[in-house]
Amino acid sequence: MKDFFTIIGGMGTPATESYIRLLNKRTPAHKDQDYLNYILVNHATVPDRSTYLLDNSKPNPYPDLLEDIKAQSELHPAFFVIACNTAHYFYDDLQKATDVPIVHMPRETVKLIKKQYPEAKRVGIIGTPGTTSDGIYDRELEALNYEVVKPTPEIQDMTSKLIFDDIKANNQVDDKLFYSILDKMINEQKSDVVILGCTELSYAQEMAHEHNFPVMDSQLVLVDKSIEMAMKLRK
């Protein structure tokens, strides 16, 4: 297969399924051959990223991610995407291990804020405890002079419940809980826009009813960047 890219996914599988579904839905296709060429690595047994970042005595996901990157690099994809925000903690080391470019989902997400929310100054970030504490989004936001708004312990507990108890454990989305989290980040924490910094939250965004909260959906950003880069391979 020529002109393809590789998706490192499975973290978790319903969220990766959401990425694939949106990827295919948003691809301008009218026949089979119009869709994109890609390989999906659904590595479901990668140890939990957030658990490791909060306690380094727990199983480390990096060796599994590195194995995937090295193995897929031998097939010479045009680029990689990693369908997990927290896994981007290891981005620099993974990129050093391959000549194939890896799309940086948090960086691409932050870059689009100015275009979609030009008046935003205070940017909230919600995700796993690993993502909200590991500094990946903080660095990208601060580099563009945004004020970073973190979840309170209460909001983080609510978010973790939605991610781990509802979506990862039971593959279901609690709409009211999702809206309550966004409401608190906007109205209590005074965020101008909230980054959905976890692909499970992007899954919630896809499955929930429409709402008017200002959000930047990191997975949707990754989907559109994937399509943009993949379509260029055909020209």
Image (spheres, helix red, strand yellow):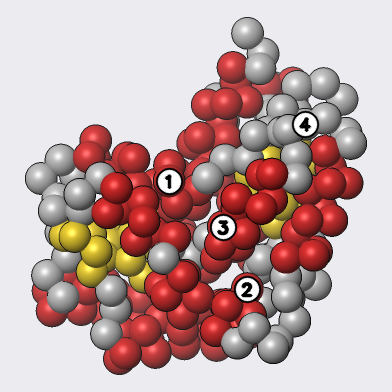
**Residue beneath label 3, please?**
88
**Residue 193 in sight from this viewpoint:** no
Circle 4: element type: loop
Residue that badge 2 annotates? 49
The amino acid marked with disc number 3 is: His
Q: Which of marks 2 and 1 is nearer the N terminus?
A: 2
Q: Position of residue 52 (x, y in %)?
A: 63, 80
The answer to whether the residue labelled 2 contacts the one labelled 1, judged by CB atoms less than 8 Å apart, is no
Circle 3 Cα neighbour tier, 10 Å, few/some/many (<14 / 14–19 / ≥20): many
Location of the C terminus by quadrant is top right
Q: Which of marks 2 and 4 is nearer the N terminus?
A: 2
Image quadrant assignment for residue 127: bottom left
Residue 128 location, x and y as percent? 48, 76
Q: In this view, does 65 lie to the left or right of 192?
A: right
Helix, strand or loop at label 1? It is helix
Real-space CA distance between mark 2 and mark 4, rounded to the nearest whole angstrom: 25 Å
Find numbered disc 2 in the image and state the secondary structure of the residue it sits on: helix
Q: How far apart are marks 2 and 1 (CA)?
A: 19 Å
Kindly identify the amino acid type of the residue bearing the numbered disc 2.
Answer: Arg
Query: Tag 1: residue type?
Result: Arg
For label 1, the residue is: 107
Left or right relative to 139: residue 170: right
Against 14, residue 2 (above or below) is: above
Say which label, 3 or 4, has the lower sequence index. Answer: 4
- Residue drawn where x is 70% and y is 86% of the image: 58
